[in-house]
């Protein structure tokens, strides 16, 4: 059997880049944003103090002490990326990794105190069985329909693998992005006009944590269900000769479809919990395509109904006009007949 450690290798690579890449961008941008903060906050402070002295004739100690504390805090935070990493990024990241690992231990395959890498190795191991081991059971002389059955099941589980890896790496990328733009987030927090930027940044950080957690839950459920079937599907490392299109085959197909549904729902659930509209996701894309299809159908039906309604109204109008004209002609004919009768009988 081919041993492919896609999840663990990709996570190891991106996990190493997370703090290194984020810290480098922080160091390059912190000085720039600190200068902007000092300029704009200094102008704001001068305006507030001048307004209170000239118009309110009142200046309290808080009006001086509070700005000094804010300036000192921002200056310290911007002096080193270590503060943001230790106080904000690492706690959220470690919480996300810890919760995701806990969901994997519920499958019963991991014991003790497993790490996130142990979880990813477990995912790679289980998916290797249903993706690559069927290739080893192929015999020469099989019909084409059996090859189609094997590759169909492999394709579904490859898609499950792709969704899980994509969700995990997207969550890590959110942490990296927050770390990289944290100077902007810190500066934005102290101005009413830009405070929504800081709030959105923290929401995105929480969304990254929840995305990793929901992805782990979806894959944990998948592994737990697979665990019940792989014991029948693979016996002593071998697969039965007639497994294609058998009962276990279709069971594994259903498990893959259920897993795909779980993984597609995970980003939406995380976005709802974080109260953030996460439009760039697989579920959103599929929902968007479906919505476009429905709306196109409604629009087409509306246009067809309008055309038919227009023709019906036009036909009805012509009918009414003809009926009216027919009635007027009848009235005229009646009047003419009455005049002729009166003229012939002399009853004028």
Image (tube, rainbow, N blue to C red):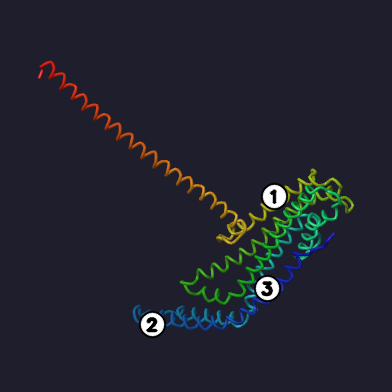
For label 1, count other residues whose C-alpha is less than 10 Å away and answer few (under 14), some (14-19) or many (20+).
some
- Residue for badge 3: 18
Residue 19 located left or right of residue 228: left
- Residue for badge 1: 258
Identify the residue at the far front of this view. Answer: 344
Mark 1 vs 3, N-terminal side:
3
- Residue for badge 2: 50
Mark 2 vs 3, N-terminal side:
3
Q: Is residue 271 above or below residue 72?
A: above
Q: Nearer the viewer, mark 1 or mark 2?
A: 1
The C terminus, quarter of image: top left
Image coordinates for residue 240, horizontal then vertical, percent:
86, 47
Q: Nearer the viewer, mark 1 or mark 3?
A: 1
Image coordinates for residue 139, horizontal then vertical, percent:
86, 51
Q: Is residue 80 above or below residue 280?
A: below
Residue 14 located left or right of residue 140: left
Front-most of residues 113 and 223: 223
Front-most of residues 36 and 76: 36
Image coordinates for residue 100, horizontal then vertical, percent:
71, 61
Image coordinates for residue 262, horizontal then vertical, percent:
67, 53
Q: Nearer the viewer, mark 2 or mark 3?
A: 3
Mark 2 touching mark 3, by CB under 8 A?
no
Report how far apart the C-alphas of labels 1 and 2 lie in the structure.
Answer: 65 Å
Secondary element at image label 2: helix
């Amino acid at each position: 059997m081919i041993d492919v450690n896609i999840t663990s290798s990709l996570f190891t690579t991106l996990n190493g880049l997370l703090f290194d890449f984020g810290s480098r961008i922080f160091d390059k941008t912190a000085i720039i944003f600190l200068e902007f903060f000092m300029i704009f906050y200094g102008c704001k402070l001068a305006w507030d103090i001048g307004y209170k002295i000239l118009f309110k004739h009142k200046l309290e100690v808080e009006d001086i002490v509070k700005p000094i504390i804010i300036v000192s805090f921002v200056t310290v935070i911007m002096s080193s990326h270590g503060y943001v990493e230790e106080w904000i990024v690492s706690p959220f990241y470690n919480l996300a990794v810890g919760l995701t690992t806990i969901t994997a231990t519920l499958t019963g395959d991991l014991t003790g105190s497993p790490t996130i890498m142990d979880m990813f190795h477990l995912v790679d191991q289980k998916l290797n069985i249903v993706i690559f081991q069927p290739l080893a059971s192929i015999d020469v002389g099989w019909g084409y329909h059996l090859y189609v059955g094997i590759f169909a099941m492999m394709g579904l589980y490859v898609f499950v693998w792709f969704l899980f890896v994509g969700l995990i790496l997207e969550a890590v990328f959110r942490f990296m992005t927050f770390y990289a733009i944290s100077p902007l987030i810190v500066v934005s927090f102290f101005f009413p006009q830009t405070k929504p930027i800081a709030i959105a940044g923290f929401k995105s950080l929480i969304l990254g944590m929840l995305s990793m957690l929901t992805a782990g839950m979806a894959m944990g459920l998948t592994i737990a269900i697979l665990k019940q079937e792989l014991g029948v599907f693979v016996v002593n490392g071998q697969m039965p000769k007639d497994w294609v299109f058998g009962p276990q085959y279709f069971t594994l197909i259903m498990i893959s479809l259920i897993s795909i549904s779980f993984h597609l729902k995970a980003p939406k659930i995380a976005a709802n919990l974080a109260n953030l509209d996460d439009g760039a996701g697989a579920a959103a894309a599929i929902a968007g395509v479906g919505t476009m299809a429905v709306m196109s159908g409604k629009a087409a039906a509306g246009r067809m109904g309008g055309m038919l309604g227009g023709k019906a109204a036009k036909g009805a109008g012509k009918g009414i006009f003809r009926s009216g004209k027919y009635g007027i002609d009848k009235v005229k004919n009646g009047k003419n007949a009455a005049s002729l009768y009166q003229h012939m009988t002399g009853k004028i």
